[in-house]
Image: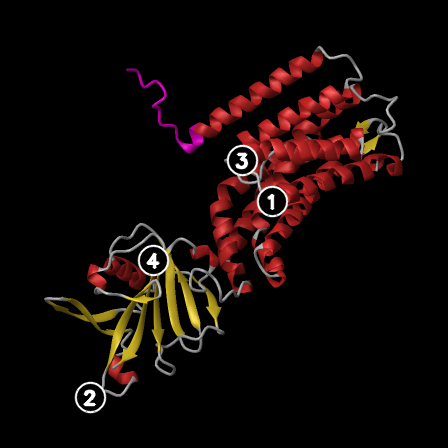
Amino acid sequence: MSDIVALFALFVLITIAVGGAVEDENRLKSLSLAWVIFLLISFPTLSSEWARMTSELIDDENDSHYGLPDIWEGKQVVCFHFPDDHAPDGYDGARYHIDSDGTQFMTDSDWNHTGACIGGFSNFENGLELMDEAVTASGGDFAYNSTQYTFGLQINSIAGVNPCDASTCSDTSGAYWSLFHNGQMAMVGISDLTLKADSVITWSIETW
Amino acid sequence: MFDAHAVTIGTHGMLLINAAMLCLVGWALWKAERRLESGSDWILLLMLCVFAVSGRVLLDPIPNVQPVTIIVLLAGIHYGAPRAIALATAVTLCSNLILGHGLWSLYQAVGWSAVGVAGALLSSRLLVDGRLNIERLAMVAAASGFAFDWIVSISALHSMGSELLLPYMVAGLPFDLLHAAGNVAFAAWLANPLSEIMTKHLDTSSPMAVNDSVSSTL
């Protein structure tokens, strides 16, 4: 939002500066050229900021990209889903969306999960590298605790939430952070996961 | 064996080449027009079609900035709605044969035809004593950018629910803004020379001449 305000202020300043510096007969020519150049230069910022602002208007649960914002179509995303009443502070009651530069821009309170998705990434080939980048983009809100085993990395807790805090664990039952890749349970651990261009990684607590 | 075409040209380089080609097309058409007899309105419409198609194709790397809208608007003002619609449809078809032809072509043809009709309807206000009022034209051109984009947006209803149409149109506003700004720039820079040429080739014996009433143009 602040970027849009800044762009609008710059637009007004350019209009005043160019409009005041040119004679009447050439004013429209100069102004229109300045407007087009300004819009072309600022277009990437303007369109992405506008897309973030308007993404909340589109609530399409049948979206082919897991109901995520349109601006993440074809991009890589990491989602953290928490059981009700166990979401970290600030991420309860809805699914929150954080862009790759750390900007939180959309809250989907109708979604049937609580937590956050951090997306807009591209060109990551390894699951762990993408997850680490997502955690950094969230400002560390979804930092995880893990144990390295010979068979791979096991996630013990995410955002301080241990699966056994949210579910009953005993000798005959338990809970764990489960990894899904594009809607399917991953057959390998996060450190061995090979990504696609539009991979959506989802972490959620499952029980046994 | 020579590999004479194995040159890597970046986006900006390609845009420069396209701009140079558009200037070449414009210059050649302008020189050819000098040799035309006055009143050659259909030949001029063909030349405008060539320039509009070239402009749309060559400026394709720049989102939504192209001269078609202003050319169709001027055609509507000077030559009336029927010929503006013919021009709009021909430009859409020819340019989409290169850029991609499909369902959207119909909506684009309708959108630009609507711009041409608006030009015909407003001709008496935009063309005062044989001279274009550039400020008014710029305002109509800017509004035409939004109107055209919204008409084309209706084509999205073929693939999504009507409840998503408004959010879809709102999401596209930055593109509409760029179209409107581009139209104003083309109006400021091209409208007067194009208007002079169009006026020169206006066949006053035609029933669709500019001074005819709007009802006869439609």
Quadrant in the picture for the N terminus of chain B: top left
Q: Report the residue marked by disc 3.
A: B99
The range drawn in magenta is B1-13
Q: Secondary structure at mark 1?
A: helix
Magenta span includes B4: yes
Q: Position of residue B40 (x, y in %)?
A: 77, 17
Q: Report the residue marked by disc 2.
A: A172
Q: Report the residue marked by disc 1.
A: B104
Magenta span includes B143: no
Q: Check disc 3 and give the amino acid type.
A: Leu
Marked residue chain, label 4: A
Q: Check disc 2 and give the amino acid type.
A: Thr
Marked residue chain, label 1: B
- Considering depth in this image, is A208 or B33 the residue closer to the camera? A208
Q: Are marks 3 and 2 in contact (CB under 8 Å)?
A: no
Q: Check disc 1 and give the amino acid type.
A: Trp
Q: Position of residue A75 (x, y in %)?
A: 38, 54
Q: Secondary structure at mark 3?
A: helix
Alpha carbon distance from label 2 to label 1: 60 Å
Who's the residue at 59% across and 39% down the image?
A35
Discs 4 and 2 carry the same chain letter: yes
Alpha carbon distance from label 4 to label 3: 30 Å
Residue B113 quadrant: top right
Q: Position of residue B130 (x, y in %)?
A: 83, 26
Q: Secondary structure at mark 2?
A: loop
Q: Report the residue marked by disc 4.
A: A199
Who's the residue at 45% across and 28% down the image?
B14
